[in-house]
Image (spheres, helix red, strand yellow):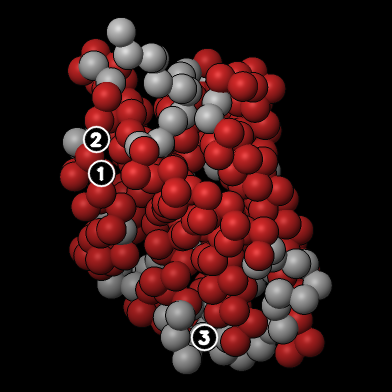
């Protein structure tokens, strides 16, 4: 009789790759002081992301803005993106260390090691993002609903559900950040921030994908259906939330053109032709993988 697979196990062919991820994390750790060129400062005269990727671009509300107002909104949208990383990355160490405490040696050794590395790296990211907001003179947005869900509901689910849930959130935010900022038109420190963050996040995403793929390769169908429902629920909630956050109206120096009390106006922004087309491009790698694994 074959042995029961360990919790959060990865396929045998991925175990060597996971050890390489661990080695890479130790060889190139992110450092708050030295990993970014802080001395160059933030140039707020440049955009923090590609101008064509503003939340209101392609909607009737964009025509109500002056060039200066569009520029201001880009920086506030960037503040929301950084705040989203902070609020969610504060949750991940709690969730993942919880798995370490609860399951201990039931976890494969490489998985135990990587959950600790993952948690350590997220703490450095949080401090780095806070320093960036201060350097840029940007506000910290309030947390979305997803971090609360990750703290309160996800620990009640099987660990693979927590890995999948965090993967979807991290991957969506990471794809959006990299798609919008890796351009010569973008402020150099902002571009460097997201690029350096991506080095760690690419490893985090690979780890989570391997865990989920291994589970889908061996689990019976009745265990997979709840994961499909979780993925669909997360995507239905997160994609509109990533496309627009009404809290931005608290920080603009001018009356925000969208009436945040008007659900139809908010929906018009979230599901505008421009936003749908943008998400189809920047989120394509994630959706391709979700379909390939059989999650959608």
Give SS at disc 3.
loop
What's the distance in space between the residues labelled 3 and 2, CA to CA?
35 Å
Q: Are marks 1 and 2 in contact (CB under 8 Å)?
A: yes
The quarter of the displayed image where residue 291 is located: top left
Residue density around tag 1, few if under 14, some if 14–19, many if 20 or more, within 10 Å: some
What's the distance in space between the residues labelled 3 and 1, CA to CA?
31 Å
Mark 1 highlights which residue? 290
Give SS at disc 2.
loop
Does label 1 or label 2 sit earlier along the sequence? 1
Q: Is residue 254 left or right of residue 182?
A: right
What residue sits 59% from the left and 71% below the top?
196
In this view, the residue in front, 64 or 23, is 23
In this view, the residue in front, 136 or 22, is 22
Mark 2 highlights which residue? 295
The quarter of the displayed image where residue 80 is located: bottom right
Give SS at disc 1.
helix
């Amino acid at each position: 009789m074959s042995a029961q697979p360990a919790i959060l196990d990865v396929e045998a062919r991925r175990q060597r790759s996971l050890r390489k991820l661990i080695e890479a994390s130790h060889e190139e750790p992110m450092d708050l002081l030295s990993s970014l060129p802080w001395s160059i400062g933030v140039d707020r005269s440049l955009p923090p992301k590609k101008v064509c990727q503003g939340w209101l671009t392609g909607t009737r509300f964009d025509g109500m803005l002056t060039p200066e107002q569009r520029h201001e909104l880009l920086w506030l949208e960037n503040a929301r993106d950084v705040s989203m990383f902070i609020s969610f990355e504060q949750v991940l160490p709690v969730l993942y260390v919880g798995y370490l405490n609860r399951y201990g040696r039931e976890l494969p050794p490489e998985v135990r090691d990587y959950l600790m590395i993952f948690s350590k790296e997220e703490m450095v990211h949080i401090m780095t993002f806070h320093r960036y907001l201060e350097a840029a003179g940007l506000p910290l947005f309030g947390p979305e609903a997803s971090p609360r869900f990750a703290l309160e509901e996800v620990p009640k689910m099987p660990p693979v559900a927590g890995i999948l849930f965090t993967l979807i959130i991290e991957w969506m935010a990471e794809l959006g950040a990299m798609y919008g900022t890796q351009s010569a038109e973008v402020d150099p420190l902002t571009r460097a921030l997201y690029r350096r963050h991506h080095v760690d996040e690419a490893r985090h995403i690979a780890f989570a994908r391997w865990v989920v793929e291994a589970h889908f390769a061996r689990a019976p169908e009745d265990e997979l259906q709840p994961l499909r429902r979780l993925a669909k629920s997360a995507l239905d909630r997160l994609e509109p939330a990533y496309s627009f956050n009404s809290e931005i109206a608290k920080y603009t120096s001018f009356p925000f053109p969208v009436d945040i009390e008007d659900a139809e106006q908010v929906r018009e922004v979230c599901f505008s032709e421009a936003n749908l087309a943008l998400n189809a491009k920047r989120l394509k790698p994630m959706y391709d993988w979700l379909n390939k694994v059989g999650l959608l």
